[in-house]
Amino acid sequence: MNDMTDANDTRSKIQVKHDYYRQPKYSTVERFISYQHQIVTLRDAGVKNILLVGPGDGLVPYYLKEVLGINVTICDIDPDLKPDIVADVRNMPCEDESFDAVAVFEVLEHLPFEDFPVALKELSRISKGKVFISLPYRNVAFEVLIKFPYIRTLLKRPWIHFIIKKPIKFLGFEFSQQHYWEIDTVTTKKVVEGVVSKFFNITKRRHVVFDPYRYFIDLEKKPNVENEFAEEYYNDFLRNNPEDYKTARWFSSKPREFDYHQTKKVIERALRGVQARQTLEIGPGDAVWTDLIIPHTEKITLLDQSEEMLKRAKKRFPENNKISYVHSDIERFSSDAKFDLICGIRCFEYFEDKPAVVKKFYDLLNDGGKLVIVTKNPEHSRTKETQKKDLHKGQISKEEMISLLKQTGFKVETNLSAVSRIKTKYALGRTVSKLLHNIHVATNGVITLPFINNAFTESYIYVARKK
């Protein structure tokens, strides 16, 4: 492939010259097996308009177009390959949802791994739904293939295939200098698929027959979690539910009340000793957490995109001149004044462009200003249940969140479980969970249950300071 960024230079450069594809060593049996797999994958996808990124020697797009009659647009960074679009996969000059499907075979490993999510987000943007990728998987394998007469009729498949594989760990081994990373070298399959799952649902995964080095993943893009969706959801919910939202959301059951008190505990800890002149609270809802913030600030601005939520908040604080209300979302919000404290409690998962939002937080803070965020954990044991709801699909892992804060320029001071629970519908579960959480918070996260805590953490709190 042909995309690469120098580790010390963000400008793209051609990594594989076009004459590389003409060398005898390029046309291997394994590569042609991979070609057949690429063709069959796209043939059976049921789409007529495909963007193919990284055409290589051109055999696959030729077959798709000339033999199968599929409309294929070719994209590559190298103009010598005469692609339809000359571009970097991380920054495509294409309209949103321009193609029925996007195929990126043996390409993404040519980018630094930190650019992997950047490329995936771009692929999600320009595809209407389907994306197909393949990646190198560094392993050794033992394969058995059985084929006999009538197998197609009996089993509706050309052969029976068995594979036993394991990661390869040869001392001093170095993979192609054209690659920044491969699965099980530099990173792992679990990490790769975890990153992929932020943007897509994985519908199919497999190794190529007789070439298990190539790992194919079929993807279906997730619906975007847009601000407008959250705004519409909460406005409709509140119009149809006249009762007090705080009571309905946090005190309608013992487990919900348990979650509320755990969250309250970590917020109070995060605000200990804070005295701000100007504070911005993002997504305050009906001001359920605002009363915890008010003692720590002279003035506070409540910013919410739900007009109904702000109406409820005003009723909670009918005559408080410390509070001002702004009906907007964070991306459109602007302020001449800067803030000493910004709080976003259980709303960060609603934001689609999270790097842009964190950058906005950074720009709105005074130097030394504090950021407090509580947001859901996608690795919680019940995450599949919560992520069935479109409203909560935008969850971000602890590692990604800390990395995002640091990359923006924040110093992360604290990261604790905000809600940590085990079977809290039972009194014993609440007692055990409370004890473990109290110890975790009291020791500032030093004492926790390794390998277990993350699975039972429903949400995390992040406290960061602008340097």
Image (cartoon, grey):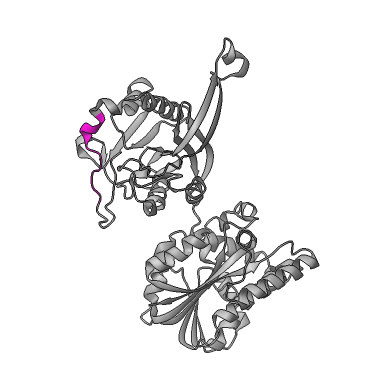
Residue 384 position within the rendered picture, expressed as x and y whole percent measured from the top left: 62, 51
Judge whether residue 334 can be spotted in this image. Answer: no
Quarter of the rendering occupied by the C terminus: bottom left
Q: Nearer the viewer, residue 49 or 1?
A: 1
Work out whether 136 lies above or below 257. above
Identify the residue shown where x is 52% and y is 88%.
322
Q: Residue furthest front?
A: 171
Q: Nearer the viewer, residue 290 or 263?
A: 263
Stretch of the chain drawn in magenta: 12-21
Left or right: 359 as drawn, with respect to 460: left
**Quadrant of residue 449 in the image?**
bottom right
Identify the residue shown where x is 37% and y is 71%.
409
Chief secondary structure of the magenta portion = loop
Residue 339 position within the rendered picture, expressed as x and y whole percent measured from the top left: 42, 81
**Quadrant of residue 253 in the image?**
bottom right
Left or right: 206 as drawn, with respect to 252: left
Identify the residue shown where x is 56% and y is 88%.
295
Left or right: 356 as drawn, with respect to 441: left
As for residue 59 lying within the magenta part, the answer is no
Identify the residue shown where x is 74% and y is 68%.
432
Left or right: 269 as drawn, with respect to 364: right
Q: Residue furthest top?
A: 149
Residue 150 position within the rendered picture, expressed as x and y whole percent measured from the top left: 59, 11
Quarter of the rendering occupied by the N terminus: top left
Judge whether residue 46 can be spotted in this image. Answer: yes
